[in-house]
């Protein structure tokens, strides 16, 4: 005889979505994805907004399912927290802090704050700049000595991490090529002495690439990301030379082609900044991959105050999202046939979904990632390098762990009350600090201006993930490990 139970149940927090003809739920906050079978889908539908006991549910669904199967499904759904006892509050948001001292895995070295371009939207020189790189007290170029100190700082702060990442950034990184060369050599030697692996990468606008630089990049396995906005008319819209204001495409294109021809040891990626008039994602993607040969392309909507004339308005965001969705379908088609596809935005998010990432912080800034300014000041990330307000130490004196702790406490998702009811929070966690600072004047606020876009894009990524999980699960192995 089955003992009837009167415990009332309700649904818990999840985001439902459909893929490959199957229903799924994305659990919040655990970030797990579950495919629903017919019984569990029926239980969740029957429960809906109501409060019912397992027996009520079994009765309610008796014309379609065996009552004991329903009860067992209810148990399973309770175990994964898709449903729970009514009146029993869900656990409050975890305030668990990362263990400290947290090892540094990536250091971004701003080897110069100078640039030969004056891109209309640049956060380093534009209207939204945080650091006064033109008139400030910082040196224009990082010295060899500061770069060496930075390497020592990184190796020390990486603690037990076996492989560290050293990324060079600017301004235009290649304007300080001699220091780059010396630093790579030094860092490689020091890492080897300490029994650590080290990976190098840099970001460049490609205007200063020359045969010997390309040779060096290839020979030293340096990962390269080129900031480029697409075909000529799009690249030339805002990516222009300082002084004469001329477009850069004609200079950049042949150099990039040469880089891609010669440098094969690491994939070469493009990073596109989308602005009001540069929003044709599909065309940009095709140009950069099929016509130029980039391995991957990542898109980022410009970070700016909404009043800038290049800022993307609401209509622009809708158009951008439509194009992202179209490109996501393109990606799916390729992934179903185990073909490479270079749309890095979707790959990055699918990897996080696959790994069940649930974040207390939007990114590694101030945690496993830090930016170093030309004078050796250490800040949250490259975008804040040189800003006294966002300084966490110096390469000479090390990280100020008190300041770091303060930053981590203040920026924990638990303090972003606006995000507490949002199903996308395991992946978004409030969004980029730099964007928040530019919009609201503080890194601590969530980026509430783009929630709709984030949720819609996350839903697309979940759907593509579900399609792959059902139709070609083997593909997802590329995200393991
Ligand atoms: S910023 Fe918006 S989308 Fe992101 S977690 Fe907060 S509420 Fe959700
Ligand atoms: S704060 Fe923004 S720019 Fe800095 S690492 Fe995080 S996401 Fe990137």
Image (tube, rainbow, N blue to C red):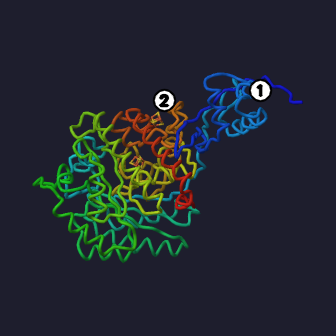
Residue 400: where, in percent of width, then height?
Answer: 49, 49
Q: Which mark is residue 55?
A: 1
Q: Tell me which numbered mark, 1 or 2, is placed earlier along the sequence.
A: 1
Q: Residue 250 vs residue 460: left or right?
A: left
Q: Which residue is mark 2?
A: 418
Quadrant of residue 54 within the rendered picture = top right
Residue furthest front as drawn? 63
Determine the residue positioned at 55% across, 35% down.
Answer: 414
Q: Are marks 1 and 2 in contact (CB under 8 Å)?
A: no
Of the 4 image quadrants, the one containing the N terminus is top right
Q: Residues within 10 Å of mark 1 (few under 14, many from 20)?
A: many
- Spatial separation of the CA atoms under disc 1 and disc 2: 37 Å
Q: Residue 155 vs residue 314: left or right?
A: right
Residue 239: where, in percent of width, then height?
Answer: 20, 53
Mark 1: which secondary structure? helix
Q: Residue 313 vs residue 168: left or right?
A: left
Q: Say if 78 sits above or below 236 in the image.
A: above
Residue 13: where, in percent of width, then height?
Answer: 59, 33
Of the 4 image quadrants, the one containing the C terminus is bottom right
- The answer as to whether callout 2 falls within 8 Å of ligand 1 is yes
Residue 15: where, in percent of width, then height?
Answer: 55, 36
């Amino acid at each position: 005889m089955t003992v009837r139970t009167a415990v009332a149940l309700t649904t818990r927090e999840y985001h439902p979505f459909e893929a490959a003809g199957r229903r799924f739920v994305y659990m919040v906050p655990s970030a797990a994805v579950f495919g629903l079978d017919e019984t569990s889908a029926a239980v969740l539908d029957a429960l809906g907004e109501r409060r019912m006991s397992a027996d009520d549910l079994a009765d309610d669904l008796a014309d379609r399912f065996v009552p004991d199967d329903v009860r067992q499904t209810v148990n399973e759904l309770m175990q994964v927290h898709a449903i729970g006892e009514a009146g029993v509050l869900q656990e409050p948001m975890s305030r668990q802090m990362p263990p400290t001292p947290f090892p540094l895995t990536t250091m971004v070295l701003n080897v110069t704050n100078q640039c030969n371009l004056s891109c209309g939207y640049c956060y380093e020189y534009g209207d939204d700049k945080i650091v006064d790189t033109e008139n400030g007290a910082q040196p224009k170029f990082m010295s060899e000595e500061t770069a060496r100190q930075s390497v020592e700082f990184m190796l020390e702060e990486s603690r037990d991490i076996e492989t560290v990442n050293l990324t060079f950034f600017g301004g235009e990184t290649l304007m300080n090529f001699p220091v780059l060369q010396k630093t790579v050599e030094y860092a490689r030697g020091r890492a080897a002495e300490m029994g650590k692996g080290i990976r190098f990468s840099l970001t460049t606008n490609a205007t200063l690439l020359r045969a010997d630089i390309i040779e060096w990049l290839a020979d030293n396995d340096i990962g390269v990301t080129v900031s480029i906005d697409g075909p000529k008319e799009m690249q030339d819209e805002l990516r222009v030379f300082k002084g004469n204001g001329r477009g850069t495409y004609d200079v950049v294109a042949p150099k990039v082609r040469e880089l891609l021809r010669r440098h094969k040891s690491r994939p070469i990626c493009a990073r596109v900044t989308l602005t009001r008039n540069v929003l044709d994602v599909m065309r940009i993607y095709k140009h950069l991959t099929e016509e130029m040969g980039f391995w991957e392309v990542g898109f980022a909507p410009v970070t700016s105050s909404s009043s800038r004339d290049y800022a993307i308005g609401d209509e622009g965001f809708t158009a951008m999202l439509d194009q992202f969705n179209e490109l996501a379908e393109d990606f799916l088609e390729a992934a179903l046939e185990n073909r490479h596809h270079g749309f890095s935005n979707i790959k990055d998010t699918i990897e996080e979904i696959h790994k069940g990432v649930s974040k207390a912080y939007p990114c590694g800034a101030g945690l496993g990632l830090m930016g170093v300014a030309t004078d050796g000041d250490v800040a949250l990330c490259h975008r804040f390098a040189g800003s006294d307000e966002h300084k966490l130490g110096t390469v000479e004196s090390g990280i100020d762990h008190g300041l770091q702790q303060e930053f981590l406490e203040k920026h924990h998702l638990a303090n972003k009350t606006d995000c507490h009811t949002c199903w996308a929070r395991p992946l978004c966690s409030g969004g980029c600090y730099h964007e928040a600072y530019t919009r609201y004047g503080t890194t601590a606020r969530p980026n509430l201006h783009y929630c709709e876009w984030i949720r819609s894009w996350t839903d697309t990524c979940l759907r593509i993930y579900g399609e792959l999980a059902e139709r070609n699960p083997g593909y997802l192995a590329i995200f393991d490990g």
